[in-house]
Amino acid sequence: MCLICTEPLDSLAEMVWLDCSWCDAVTAIPPEMVNLVRLNCHDCPRLASIPDTLVDLVCLYCYNCPLLASIPSTLVDLMELSCTKCLLISSIPSSLVKLVVLYCAGCPLLVSLPDTLAQLVELVCPDCPRLASIPGELVKLNMLNCSNCPRLVAIPSTLIQLGWLNCFNCPLILSIPSTLARLTYERCAGCPWLPQNAATYPNHTPSLLRLQRWFRTGKKQVFKRVIRSKAFNEFVFHPDRIGGRLVKRQMEAELGAMRPATKQRVE
Ligand SMILES: [Zn+2]
């Protein structure tokens, strides 16, 4: 039980700060709470929506709300938002242009991020299996955690304020842009074709095997694009890659059953 469950609406309506987190009963935030500046409503398993009337909100922490399907586009004053592990969230409104901090980790339906978040300093978006890109317009970004995003293909070269980057286990990233001169922390293990990782080839076998799994589970186009890239072939067939040819034969054997007979061999 939380304040929403126990207090009369009259006393709630004047509040500027509310924490109703961890309540199993709450299903809605009263839309009359228009003075709220900060709302903590995380870990509410029955909360299905945030009212679009809360236009004064600056901070919204609504993570771990599995029924929450959207963030209202009217919350244009938001500076901090965490919708981490909101399993139904598929987008972040492009109108949230004042956002400084955005946590959207583990959102399985999130496909993209708006290119309007020019004030964003901190972006934490790991474990988003559909996220395909980081907008190059996030020019103030200082901290980026995009680890375990298997569809991410690049870190934009325009993120010149970036000081902290974690792209651990992003196996489609081919390079870290040289324009990121302010980087002081960089975690990029599990990105098999980054030059700085080439010497540790055996450590990347799990990434290659994961690519095989995506291929088997239907992400054929992604895999086809990767396996035909110059970087991939340089990585697998480089003379220094002990075991590279073995991996290649293993992959061909595993993929062979899926490849239509008319298709040419992948070389
Ligand atoms: Zn409650």
Image (cartoon, rainbow, N blue to C red):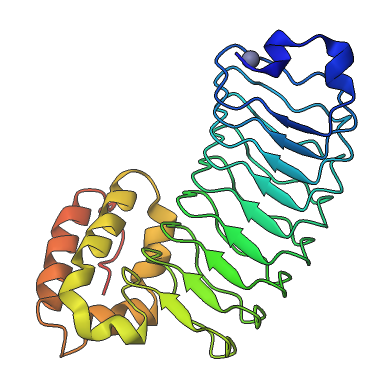
User: In front: 244, or 184?
Assistant: 184
Residue 150 visible from this viewpoint: yes
Q: Quadrant of ligand 1?
A: top right
Residue 13 position (above or below residue 16) = above
Seen at 9% across and 71% down, the residue is 246
Quadrant of residue 9 within the rendered picture: top right
**Looking at the image, is 38 positioned above or below residue 34?**
below
Provide residue 98's location: percent of width, then percent of height. 82, 57
Tell me: 107 left or right of 186.
right
Is 221 drawn above or below residue 153 in the view shown? Answer: above
Position of 198 with respect to 39 (left or right) is: left
Residue 109 versus residue 144: which sits nearer the camera?
144
Q: Residue at position x 37%, y 60% from top?
A: 223
Left or right, residue 83 beside residue 245: right
Decide if residue 262 is in sight here.
no
Locate residue 172, reporting x and y percent.
Answer: 42, 67
Query: Residue 1 at what x, y percent from top left?
Result: 60, 13
In percent of width and height, residue 28 lies at: 72, 17
Q: How many discs mark residues in the rendered view?
A: 0
Picture residue at 83% right of the left edge, 57% below the top: 97
- Identify the image quadrant of the C terminus: bottom left
- Residue visible at 65% across and 83% down in the picture: 160
Query: Quadrant of the rendered structure where residue 197 is?
Result: bottom left
